[in-house]
Image (cartoon, rainbow, N blue to C red):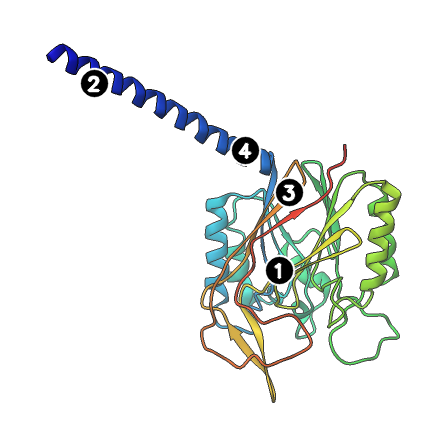
Amino acid sequence: MKRRSFLIKSIIGSIGMAVADTLSVNASSVESGRMEKKGKALFRIGICTDLHQDLITDGPARVQSFITEMNKLRPDFIIQMGDFCVPKPANQPIMDIWNQFKGPKYHVIGNHDTDGGFTHDQVVEFWNAKGKYYSFDYNNYHFVILNGNERAPENKLKGYPNSILKEQHNWLKQDLDSTNLPVMVFCHQGIDNDLDGLKEGNQMRILFERANKKAGFQKVQLVLSGHHHEDYHNVYNNINYLQINSISYQFAHLKDGYDFASTIDPIWAFITVYDNGIIDVKGKRSSYKNEKETGEYDGYPTVPFISDREIKVEVRE
């Protein structure tokens, strides 16, 4: 009986090990399938926009949350996409927090960053930015940062300027012509959004499409913007336009004007680009501190989050 019991236990044990091995192989296969779906990560970017330090009361805490998380996740670089802070000494604490990130940091100028009469050059100096508009390469990708806040001399209209003038336009055209790498573009104002977006948006879209046609592949892959405090993704003529929601608030569109609908938690995006053409966007979700009447208006919905998205772009052979 003891021998029979021993044999039964041995057989059961062998079966169990075989099952465990099979499960292990299957688990590895599943994980391998996931990796194949995502491909190899080329780089990761942490993105926030529209802090509006000079309009809110908890700006330092929101930036600190972003920077603390980015130092944990360790993206290849971070970028803020405008309406960050005006270049005055009282905002130095914001810059000190931003500079805690242990890696490359980039800036896009927004329309509110010159409030109070400051110039673009003063903003660039205060932020230690690379320029008013500029480009750089990283891991076989080309990144373009635009300044959509130029004003033509003949433009006497009140309100914020939202233009890219001839000099910058010519620079952009030459910059795109000079690279054979896939391109990502950052601009504060939406290039795909005619509701207070870039005035020359249609002209810019045509420029991108012609650059793609000339290159013979999907050269300009992704165009990112802030400014509108919204959450959307559009595709025009095989070019992706991604709006990143504000880290701080959305406009509550009331019947008699508007108010601020601040999120309880700061929100931002974390983007991973893979070698098989998948661009993975991980957003953050929150809720509003106070329920405000958002109302109806001719734009995208008012939401307290940045959506997770998986964008597929063409990979050049």
Q: Earlier in the sequence, mark 1 or mark 2?
A: 2
**Along the line of sight, the residue nearer the viewer: 114 or 201:** 201
**Along the line of sight, the residue nearer the viewer: 130 or 305:** 305
**Hey, what amino acid is under mark 4?**
Gly
Label 2 – label 4 distance at C-alpha: 36 Å
Q: Secondary structure at mark 3?
A: strand
Badge 3: how crowded within 10 Å, few (<14), some, or many (20+)? many
Q: Are marks 2 and 4 in contact (CB under 8 Å)?
A: no
Q: Please name which of the two marks, 1 or 2, marks the residue nearer to the observer.
A: 2
Q: Secondary structure at mark 2?
A: helix
Residue 197 visible in this rendered orientation of the protein: yes
Q: Which residue is mark 3?
A: 278
Label 4 – label 3 distance at C-alpha: 15 Å
Q: Earlier in the sequence, mark 2 or mark 4?
A: 2
Q: Is residue 18 above or below residue 76?
A: above
On screen, residue 181 versus residue 273, left or right, reads right
Label 1 – label 2 distance at C-alpha: 60 Å
**Hey, what amino acid is under mark 1?**
Ile
Quick one: quadrant of the N terminus?
top left
Q: Earlier in the sequence, mark 2 or mark 3?
A: 2
Q: Please name which of the two marks, 2 or 4, marks the residue nearer to the observer.
A: 2
Q: Which residue is mark 2?
A: 9
Q: Which residue is mark 4?
A: 33
Badge 4: how crowded within 10 Å, few (<14), some, or many (20+)? few
Picture quadrant of residue 168: bottom right
Residue 164 visible in this rendered orientation of the protein: no
